[in-house]
Image (cartoon, rainbow, N blue to C red):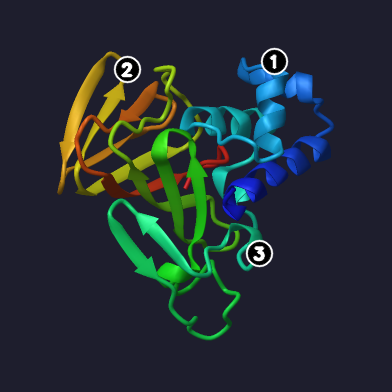
Amino acid sequence: MPAAVLQLGERIRAERARKGISLRGLARSVGLSASLISQIETGKCQPSVSTLYAITTALGVSVQDIFGEAGTSGGRVTDRVAVGQVVAPARPAHGDAQETGGPVVCPGQRDVLELDSGVIWQRLGRVPGSHVDFLLVSYAPGGCSSPAGRLMRHAGTEYGYLIQGELTVTLGPRSHRLTAGDAVSFASMTPHSYRNEGSVPAVGVWLVAGSDGTQQ
C-alpha cells in the first residue's frame, strides 16, 4: 500500500487521540462505522474526498494538517508519481532535499494523498501559518468525491481550474460540467461534489482558503 495512504491514517489517528475522541465517537460524528474509521486509520482503505473532509471537520483540523509537516518522508513520493496519464519524474531539490513544502516544489517532491475512487491529491506548496490547501487534483475516469453520491460541506472558500479532461461539479441542486480551461469558485459550505464522467483523467489546480474555518 502506498506510504502516503498509511501516513494519512496515522495522522488521523494521532489527531483523534490528541483531541481525546474515541474511535466510536469520531464514527458517530461523521456518520460512518467504527470499523471503517479503523480501516482508514490503519491504512487498509482510503477515505473518499467527502469522508476525508467529514473527518477533518469533526476533528477541527484542515486538510493541510492531515498532510503533515513538509519534509516528512511518509507522504512523499521519492521516485515517480502518476497524474492521470502523465508521469512526473523525481527531480533534485532546490536547496534542502527535505523541503517538500516550498517555496519551490518540484514534481518529485510533492506530498501525495491517494483517496478512494481514483482520486489523487498532490500538495503544490504551503506557507507556514497560512490556511490554504494548494493542490493538483486528479480524478480518474469514473472517479468521484463520494461513491455514495453524498454532497459535502466544509469550511473555506474553494477555487478550481481544470487543466485537462471533464469534471462535473454539483453545487446544491445544480450540476455544472467543466471542460479544460474552465474555472469554478464557491463557498465550501455550499453542498457540493465532484465526478469525472469522461473517458480521460480530469486534472486541475484547486485551492481551498480558510479551510480551518478562518478567513483569508
Helix, strand or loop for disc 3 = loop
Q: Earlier in the sequence, mark 2 or mark 1?
A: 1
Total numbered badges shown on the rendered structure? 3
The disc at residue 154 is none
Q: Amino acid at mark 1?
A: Arg
Q: Earlier in the sequence, mark 3 or mark 1?
A: 1
- How many C-alpha atoms fall within 10 Å of the one at disc 2: few (<14), some, or many (≥20)? few
Q: Please indicate whether residue 52 sits to the left or right of residue 201 in the image.
A: right
Q: Residue furthest front?
A: 1
Q: Earlier in the sequence, mark 3 or mark 2?
A: 3
Helix, strand or loop for disc 2 = loop
Q: Please indicate whether residue 154 sits to the left or right of residue 70 in the image.
A: left
Residue where numbered disc 2 is placed: 172
- Which residue does the image show at 41% across and 52% down from the upper left? 135
The disc at residue 28 is 1
Q: Amino acid at mark 2?
A: Gly
Q: Label 1 near label 2: C-beta < 8 Å?
A: no
The disc at residue 72 is 3
- How many C-alpha atoms fall within 10 Å of the one at disc 3: few (<14), some, or many (≥20)? some
Residue 205, position as x, y percentages in the image: 32, 51
Residue 146, position as x, y percentages in the image: 43, 25
The answer to whether residue 18 is visible is: yes
- How many C-alpha atoms fall within 10 Å of the one at disc 1: few (<14), some, or many (≥20)? few
- Which residue does the image show at 44% across and 73% down from the upper left? 90
Answer with the quarter of the image where residue 29 lies: top right
C-alpha distance separating marks 3 and 2: 37 Å
Helix, strand or loop for disc 1 = helix
- Which residue does the image show at 30% across and 23% down from the upper left? 171
